[in-house]
Amino acid sequence: MDLARLEDALIGQPRFRARQVWAWAARGARGYAEMTDLPAGLRERLAAEVPFSSLTLEREDRSRDGTLKALLRTHEGRPVEAVLMRYRDERRSVCVSSQSGCPLTCSFCATGQMRFGRNLTASEILDQVLHFRRRGAVDHCVFMGMGEPMLNLQAVLGACARLPEVGVTHRRTTISTVGWLPGIRRLSESELPVRLALSLHAPDDALRSQLMAVNERYPLAGVLDACRAYHARRRRRVFIEYVMLAGVNDRYEQALALARLLDRRAFKVNLIPFNPTDTAFTGSGPQAIAAFASALRRQGIPTTVRLARGRDIDAACGQLAARAPAGAGAAGVPAGPAGAG
């Protein structure tokens, strides 16, 4: 919900009322009517004056693997997508957006092909999490949806500060960046012990600049130094995200070059199978990914291969573009307050 608007509506009420309302929302309440320790008249007034969510649900799609993707709209109609991923070990991780669209046009990413809208508020970020919290507990949050979180870091950290009350600890919260250097430095100085992920995708500046225009502004050396400084302060490894593109960045010698860049104590590599987008790229095959991972591990670099979730509903890494998937069992949901259905 719009927490600033809530505060305004509660002027004249006891100061604890705002905390009461937020506590109910954070526990997954579906509306003001459930807040039984608030006076009935106040509940009715809040329902009339303060929308329970700052976002409106347009549709929701369910993947064959159980992943849920919600297409939400801001008050002026800008699209926002969020994803709930469920795992066999009972983790329930929410992937949230920090912007509507993205101004950094990475060549392989569907979001980068959208028109950029605007930064989201902290309340709009939280409402993506609360949409899924109303369905059950959530315990992880990754800022890997639409947008570059470091370009909206104040709102991102404002949302992060409240996530433990929703059930997501700081150490289970990860903020991903394409390498926006000022934001990495600011995050390192923050008191919130959230985790950092860097979208790298190439082991040298020439190739990375072809894939990611941001590299022209902030080349690899400076970005990796900032990540090492983050590790030195937090004593938490930085996740390196590396999408596997066939014939582009998946050769054995590129794995060795990547290993030379990284300190095994400060970094852990997540290899990401490429998810289809409307670009000219194709994904590396399973054997190429396995060989790349093996080469990194032989050099002592901790490496995992990410399990793709929600690919059939365009909900996987790099696919968010505020469009309905073609087929794949999509189930539209009538418009209404986010998470209220």
Image (cartoon, rainbow, N blue to C red):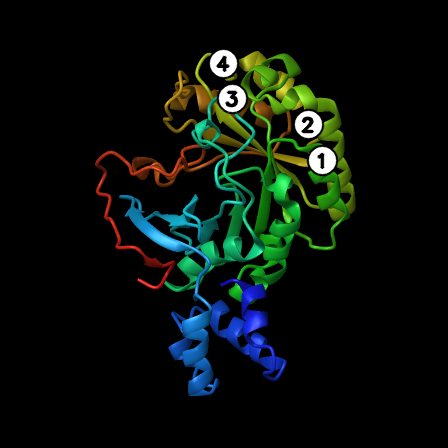
Instruction: Tell whether 278 sits left or right of 255.
Output: left
Q: Alpha-carbon distance for marks 4 and 3?
A: 13 Å
Q: Are marks 4 and 2 in contact (CB under 8 Å)?
A: no
For the residue pair 242 and 74, the one nearer the viewer reads as 74
Q: Are marks 1 and 3 in contact (CB under 8 Å)?
A: no
**Figure quadrant of the C terminus:** bottom left
Three-letter amino acid code at disc 2? Leu
For the residue pair 87 and 143, the one nearer the viewer reads as 143
Instruction: Tell whether 38 sits left or right of 308.
Output: right
Q: Which is in the foreground here, disc 2 or disc 1?
A: 1
Total tally of numbered discs in the picture: 4
Q: Alpha-carbon distance for marks 1 and 3?
A: 23 Å
From the image, tell me which residue sits under label 2.
262
Tell me residue 44's x, y (percent). Answer: 41, 80
Q: Are marks 2 and 1 in contact (CB under 8 Å)?
A: no
From the image, tell me which residue sits under label 4.
248
Mark 4 or mark 3: whose residue is earlier in sequence: 4
From the image, tell me which residue sits under label 3.
292
Residue drawn where x is 35% and y is 40% of the image: 310
Mark 2 or mark 1: whose residue is earlier in sequence: 1
Q: Alpha-carbon distance for marks 1 and 4?
A: 25 Å
* Secondary structure beneath label 2: loop
Tell me residue 297's x, y (percent). Answer: 58, 28
Q: Alpha-carbon distance for marks 2 and 3?
A: 15 Å
Q: Which is in the foreground here, disc 1 or disc 3?
A: 1
Mark 4 or mark 2: whose residue is earlier in sequence: 4
From the image, tell me which residue sits under label 1.
227
Vertical placement of residue 114 versus 217, above or below: below
Q: Which is in the foreground here, disc 4 or disc 2?
A: 4
Tell me residue 121's x, y (percent). Answer: 56, 52
Is residue 33 visible in the rendered structure shown here?
yes
